[in-house]
Image: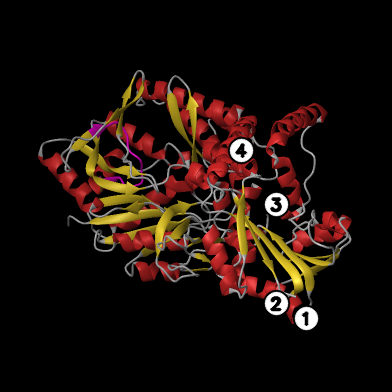
Amino acid sequence: MNGTCAVIVTYQPDNVRLAHVLSLLRGSVEAVVIVDNASAHLDEVRLREAHPSLIMKRMDSNKGIATAQNEGVALARETKCRYVLFLDQDSLPQQGMVSGLRATFERLEASGEKVACVGPRIRLPASATLSTFGRLGWLGLRRVSCREERDAAVECDFLLSSGSLVPFDVLDKVGGMEDALFIDQVDTEWCLRARSMGYRAFGACGAVLEHRLGEAYSRIWFGRWRHLPRHKAFRYYYIFRNSLILFGRNYMPAKWIFFQLQWMGALFLRYGVLGRDGELRMMLKGSMHAMRRITGKLEEAVTTPENIAQPEVTSLRTVPRPTCGLCGAVGEPLYSDLRDRLFSAPGTWHLRRCANADCGLIWLDPQAVETDVGLLYRSYYTHSAPGSQGGVVRRALRDVYRWTWAALLRPTRIIRERKRFERLFVDDLPPGDLLEVGCGAGTRLRIFAALGWRVTGQDVDAAALAEAQRTSGAEIHVGPLDDLARQGRRFDAIVMNHVIEHVVDPVRFLRTCLQMVRPGGTLICVTPNASSWGHRAFGVDWMALDPPRHLTLFTLSSLQTAAKLAGHPDPQVYTSCANAQAFAVGSFEIASTGRYAMGRRPAWRSELLSVLAQFRALKAFRGNPESGDELILRCRVKA
């Protein structure tokens, strides 16, 4: 038989994306084997619907990718196919990939080549650029580009495991994956082992796989500009340990050792010296274990808080949202395969933009069902009031920086605008009864009380409100806003800061708020501006995208439309660039590291660049008053 069996190793996968991978394989391969490394919430029913002939083995614990691939190969042999196709759980084979790989292998074999494996070109999510293949050289990894012919093949020294096509007879002669490596360098070791036995690896130019390398990328100068994939801290343990262990193998070429030393040096500088999440400790520990010949699984890697928190939320249910909630137009794909950059929600997420140019609404598709939205906020920044950071000297330097920066901004009147933001624009209203919707830890409640308002705070996040009750002394309501409305509560002012973008049904939400405003009272809502200078400048790295918590991002016109649909005849909406610097700090962190820890000190580089971004945003705002990073909605209810 000349068929192909796909082998996919899974660990805490995004069930929706994995089902999509399986659906893409239907008609391309004769069989699919999944070996699951003890995932907490694997949706086997959904997966079998996507590929009814699925063969599945569930391990009793996480055995690592090498062992799981070997288990998958053993099961795949029973299908009597000739080839095994290795895939990662989130890699998407593009049209014709499998047939292209198989045709390339058979053509090379017919020409007399001793072929170990063939692999596709890699395309990163949300990118049109295709990767090249690599050949080892004394100056580093030499990129080998494909020729113009679609069916061309180029020789390379090693391939990624995901997407590689290997015949069973080659696996019989070369052997399987090395279990002791657990993860990282598993595919490289196998390719170079096969190379030492006279086999060659080839890239198939006409085959394409969409695949994510790491969680994000950073750019560093180390002999030349390098783009380094960023991983969770424990992965650097395996990268350093396994690389150093392989240095001692007699079949590992000196060129690869030299290249890997350069790569490890760049990783050490970027994530070891400059990292803030324990990367240096993992690198050093991996190096020590390599010297002591310790292999296998690092138990610490599965007991860190970042990793044990994942299974709690992997059961998150989602619903599709293909059309605009305001005008009903079909949404056009804007960004795909986004991961949570601020906290730790699992999975990948997609954003759509309304095809109606007069609307421009952006929304998450799919999004969490309303009853599961709370699962996304278990470690949210509103759970605690902000505290001081760093020692006395560091705090003094930051105070000098802030004073200098405030002096530079004073002529632009941005400082005064920021003070209005702190008061959520109620400083020009006569005091009365005020409700802050989504008050979080209650930091503004004390400000409102000092202005003379009788203050009530509301939030659905009990963990955040515990802090608010402790620090503000205000009346606090824990639960949905609808509960207060049903109690007949009315207020002279209802304010909310960056709340509406988190709401499943923003029109119904605004309608409820307006019903609770007394005649002559005012509703004030602040939210990110999807048409801002910041979004145009940072694109997919813009902090305010915040998948999967930001369900809807408004433009000026779409926020006006939402308020009118909620029942207000004349809503006022305008923008402000006063807080562009805060958006830019997070966006620069995401662009450079893939994450922004809101409760921690950002890098000095991000802070300094954000100063320039504030002035750029101010310049853009003077030319276009609708380009501010935030929208302010004011709705005055007639007396």
When asked about the image quadrant of residue 223, the answer is top left
Label located before the other in sequence (3 or 2): 3
Q: Position of 152 compared to 122: left or right? A: left
Residue toward you, 38 or 28: 28
Pointer 2: what residue? 515
Where is residue 303 drawn, in percent x and y? 63, 48
Q: Amino acid at mark 2?
A: Gln
Label located before the other in sequence (3 or 1): 3
Overall secondary structure of the magenta section? loop
Q: How many marks?
A: 4
Q: Which mark is residue 488?
A: 1
Q: Is 261 situated above or below 56? A: above
Pointer 3: what residue? 381
Pointer 4: what residue? 614
Q: CA distance from mark 3 to mark 1?
A: 31 Å
Query: Does the segment drawn in magenta span residue 103?
Result: no
Q: CA distance from mark 2 to mark 1?
A: 10 Å
Q: Position of 308 compared to 63: left or right? A: right
Where is residue 16 drawn, in percent x and y? 44, 63
Residue toward you, 178 or 337: 337
Q: CA distance from mark 2 to mark 4?
A: 37 Å
Task: Residue at 80%, 66% (x, y): give it.
Answer: 434
When asked about the image quadrant of residue 510, the answer is bottom right
